[in-house]
Image (cartoon, helix red, strand yellow):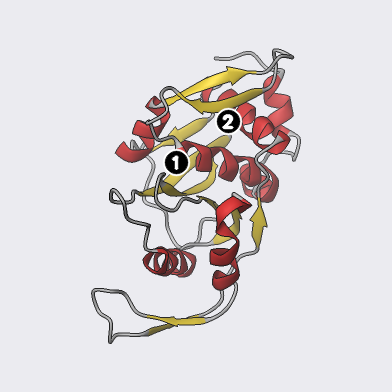
Amino acid sequence: QPIPPLDPHTPCVLALDGAESNDTFASVLVSAWGEGYAARYSRPYVPSPGQALDFDEIEIDLRELGQKHAITELTYDPMLLGQLIRRLQQPARLARKATPDHFISYPAFPAPCVPFPQGQQRLEADKGLYDLITQRRYAHAGDPALREHVANANKKIGSDGRSLRIVKREYAKKIDSLVCLSMATARAVIVLTTSAGWSPDALKALGSRRSV
């Protein structure tokens, strides 16, 4: 079943994985879809060699996403994004570099911003995403950048044989969009349970089911 474009009314979760000059800044939107979830939007920001990312432009993009879609929560890796998140939580008047004299007033970001620790919580999220995918409970529209980041990834099984972490196949490969997908999905299981028809323990339950 084809996935339609994300409309302004479908609840979704936005996840951010930050970077500055040596990695990719990624943003992903996830919504409920049938008995599972779907990746509805993915955008990686890739820095030019030797140059830092333009966080002012990224901030405008994120504020416009917040106005365009029904984002229930923004979740993020707190390591590099504290300053950006604080800015998003305040109203701002901003202009793009292409139109420096055209300022637009933006309200504060319309959803709560929730940090996503990259320790045990990430391990659980990565395992949950893997279970959803292997059980064919995940959909996507074939976004090429997201597909590339998925292809660049491998899984590292924990010593207990049950925990799992998404890792790069090679050091230079980018997987940031897939990391965002993991974070957004884990939070979507919690905050979008009503529309998805799932309980908050859905990810744990998935782990005990057979793959299809």
SS at mark 1 in the image? helix
Q: Residues within 10 Å of mark 2 (few under 14, many from 20)?
A: many
Q: Is residue 166 above or below residue 44?
A: above
Q: Number of marks in the image?
A: 2
Residue that appears at 57% across and 66% down: 83
* Image coordinates for residue 165, horizontal then vertical, percent: 60, 26
Q: Is the C-beta separation of discs 1 and 2 under 8 Å?
A: no
* Quadrant location, the N terminus: top left
Kind of residue sitting beneath label 2: Leu
* Residue on which the image places disc 1: 177
Q: Residue at x 37, y 63 (%)?
A: 54
Task: Measure how far apart labels 1 and 2 are at the Cα level.
Answer: 13 Å
Front position in the image: 190 or 23: 23
| Residue 129: mark in rendering | 2
Judge left or right: residue 85 versus residue 209: left
Q: Is residue 100 above or below residue 145?
A: below
Residue at 60 percent of width and 24 percent of height: 131
Q: Quadrant of residue 68?
A: bottom left
Q: Is residue 41 above or below residue 72?
A: above
Is tag 1's residue or tag 2's residue first in the polypeptide sequence?
Answer: 2
Above-or-below relation of 198 to 10: above
Q: Is residue 204 left or right of residue 98?
A: right
Q: Can I make out residue 8 in this image?
A: yes
Image quarter (top left, top right, bottom left or bottom right) of the C terminus: top right
Seen from the viewer's position, the closer of residues 39 and 173 is 173
The residue mark sitting in front, 1 or 2, is: 1
Q: Amino acid at mark 1?
A: Ser
Label 1 CA crowd tier, 10 Å (few <14, some 14–19, many 20+) = many
Q: Secondary structure at mark 2?
A: helix
Q: Which residue is painted at 23% across and 74% down in the image?
A: 98
